[in-house]
Image: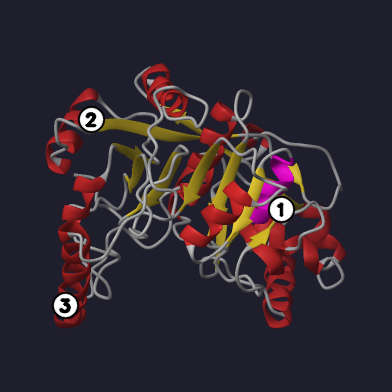
Amino acid sequence: MEGDLVHINKWLLPLSWLYGMGTAVRNALFDMGVLKSHSYNIPIICIGNLTVGGTGKTPHTEYLLQLLKKEHKVAVLSRGYKRKSKGYVLATPESTVEEIGDEPWQMKQKYPDVYVAVDRDRRRGIRHLCRDEATRDVEVILLDDAYQHRYVQAGVNILLVDYHRMITDDTLLPAGRLRESKDGISRAHIVVVTKCPHTIKPMGFRVIRKALDVRPYQQLYFSTFRYGLLQPIFGKGAERSLESIRPDESVLLLTGIGSPEQMQMDISHYSERITPLTYPDHHYFSSADVKHINQTFATLPQPRIIITTEKDATRLRTLSGELSDEVKEALYMLPVRVDIMRNEHTSFNEKITDYVLKNSRNSILAKGRDDD
């Protein structure tokens, strides 16, 4: 089992037990119908996980956007983590990272024809999307990071599991990184093991399937990351491939994401000189952070480059006046795409598109369910 990045603070296990009692009671109240889940007469797909951050939700949400947006009017509804606004906000081309959060901003910039909205109350957000004049033509809603938001009953729950942080090896917060018990996997219609290495063998797939113990009503898929060309953030220089990085080229790997280890392992295939500069997930860089970035980069031997993620690039762009000229000239973001492995992308795509078609508001198969 590849639980190679799982770390458990055993001294916190008593607190994890108390936390687990709370989440178990909450889930039991939903299962018994004491707390109500609301269903809607529009296709709703939830993309989430059982762990805290780092499973690849944004790239997988973008995969679904690419799949659906050509035939359907798609909306993404996110919490907008660490945004500075309140309530429901519909993103516009003029929206800022502070208003809607880094991941929604990234998706709106990449997919301007898609509705992107943020609201901590997902039911209220769905009501706005379905009823407001600006968005009432929406045909399918993607709920980003809402697996634990059980007040909404999604038509398809997609659970993402990090290959390097298997939920079968982890434990509950705060000793581990699980948001709820491993039993929460039972609510998933589709389970995707993410960040798999390209070299995984058939035996590895079988071991994971057995460990996760997926149910007959669930489909299990495996995905891997495919990197695009390195893109200059401030328009200086040309795009570069990872293969263009020389073994002796110094790489400052600048990340503020949940699990940067996979990215570091992948880039280590090209450079022997990697200096990781790691910040918490969704981190807003302070002036002190920028000073540290400038100083760290200045100490690296030539030739040198800075590589960051698309999500971090959204926040770094606002710091143009504080970053040194040398940093801006060498700063590149690395786009990430998702590939469904084992030639099962057609099966995965059809399950998603068939669900949307059969449950669309214009379909004769759509049932008149309570839309809250």
- Contact between marks 3 and 2 (CB within 8 A): the answer is no
- For the question of whether residue 307 can be seen, the reply is no
> Residues in magenta?
104-112
- Contact between marks 1 and 3 (CB within 8 A): the answer is no
Where disc 1 sits, the SS reads strand
Q: Residue at x 75, y 63 (%)?
A: 96
Which color scheme is applied?
A: secondary structure
Q: Position of residue 188 (x, y in %)?
A: 27, 43
What's under tag 3, amino acid-wise? Leu
Q: Tell me the residue that label 3 is attached to.
A: 13
In reply to whether residue 106 is colored magenta, the answer given is: yes
Relative to 60, is 194 on the left or the right?
left
Where disc 3 sits, the SS reads helix
Quadrant the N terminus occupies = top left
Of callouts 3 and 2, which one flags the residue occurring earlier in the amino acid sequence? 3
In reply to whether residue 274 is colored magenta, the answer given is: no
Q: Nearer the viewer, residue 324 or 185?
A: 185
Q: Tell me the residue that label 1 is attached to.
A: 304
Quadrant the C terminus occupies = bottom left
Where disc 2 sits, the SS reads helix
